[in-house]
Amino acid sequence: MIDISNFKEFSVIGAGTMGREIAQVAIMSNQFEKVNLWSRTQKTLDIAANFIETGFKKLETKGILEENSTRNLLEKLVIEKDFEKAAKADFIVESVPEFMDLKQSIFKKLGNFAPKHTILATNTSTMSITEIASNSGRPDKVVGMHFFIPIPVLELIELIRGKKTSDETFEISAAIGESLPCIRGKKFVARIEKESPGFIVNRLTITSGAYIDWLTDVAMEKAIQWKDLNEDLVVPNQMGVLAKRDYLGLDVIYNTAKYFEEKVSPDFAVGKTLNRLINEGNLGRKTGKGYLEWSEDGKPITHGAKKANLGIMDCFMALQMNEGCRLLEEGIVSSYETIDKTMIAGMRSRGPFELGMDKYQEWCILLDDFAEKSGKNYFRPTKLMRSGDFLKYK
């Protein structure tokens, strides 16, 4: 069993939506005595600190935290604008926007300032751990640690090994991930031994997102309201797919798709609709408007919406299953059950193989039809899916 008792100080570099939630669960953990939260701007730090305090108080009212525990928990939090001080920790998670040059510059600084024993984790959702670590001077100490929001609620952490990540770094990071609290039970650390763009969850969701991107362009041409298209693609007991994209942030969706366009296939290029929304500054929930309009309390406004009968949920899931087959072909994972389990933990929805195992032939027809209509041949069925041989990878 890995001993992490000496890891007492935790730092988060970046105090945005993800960073502040990572800090929150680190504070709630019994593992860390001190949690530093760094940002360049005081305003961002003030917003983050208020968010964390409010979050603790809500958990108190729900009985998840002990009554009057917020004050003691907040004593662990150190708001920090001095990067060098934030770097003096045992375990550091970087959570800045998805730009490779920005992440590389952060890791170069961390390599200069952090103690030699410090493990450096990147909360990238798609990017190469090896590239991010390239200027750090200690690539053996760098690992990918991809969290899923809301972080206090969702179980999943994707742990990704870079080409030079040491076994010790990987195992310690897994143990620290498992030590973090989760309202729904225990954190599930999905170990990904070979890096690839998007890892598991984002590799599948960004692929199915290409279908959504194409559909929104078709809807715009046909003057179909996006809130109606959203009704076509609703997983039971969850938001519709367009609402989910708004919730995450269309700038995040856009940047990730651009990365996939460069690293995976030009067929991931975003369409007219998403480009227009980005240019207008309509980024989803955080700006009050994206595909949908959002209320002040952060809820999508969908009253009066009716199905557009344009989007096909089976095609959306078929794209995920097909990309899952590609992950099996590439040796990123060895079992489709691992893919399904990871999707359930990160997205709270049934996995594509569970849903499509018995109808993969029908789904292949949907994929060919989508490729034909969109002109995006990357999304045609893989050899493993078309043949059904994925069934051998249980």
Image (cartoon, rainbow, N blue to C red):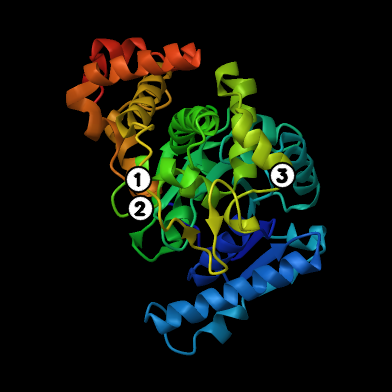
Which quadrant of the structure image shows residue 310?
top left
Reading the image, the residue beneath label 2 is: 238
Numbered disc 2: secondary structure = loop
Looking at the rendered structure, the secondary structure element under dot 1 is: loop
**Residue at x 61% of width, y 76% of height:** 76
Q: Is residue 280 above or below residue 30?
A: above
Q: Position of residue 385 (x, y in %)?
A: 30, 16
Amino acid type indicated by mark 1: Val
Q: Which mark is residue 335?
A: none
Earlier residue among tags 2 and 3: 2
Task: Report the side of 80 relative to 55 (left or right).
Answer: right
Q: Name the residue located 54 percent from the left edge and 49 percent from the top edge.
A: 246
**Which residue type does callout 2 highlight?**
Gln
Seen in the picture, residue 244 relative to 83 is either above or below; the reply is above
Query: Distance between the Cα atoms at labels 2 and 1?
Result: 7 Å
Residue 143, position in %: x, y?
58, 41
Q: Which mark is residue 280?
A: 3
**N-term mark: 1 or 3:** 1
- Marks 1, 3: nearer the viewer: 3
Residue sitting at x 59%, y 56%: 18
Q: Left of 261 or right of it: where is 208?
A: left
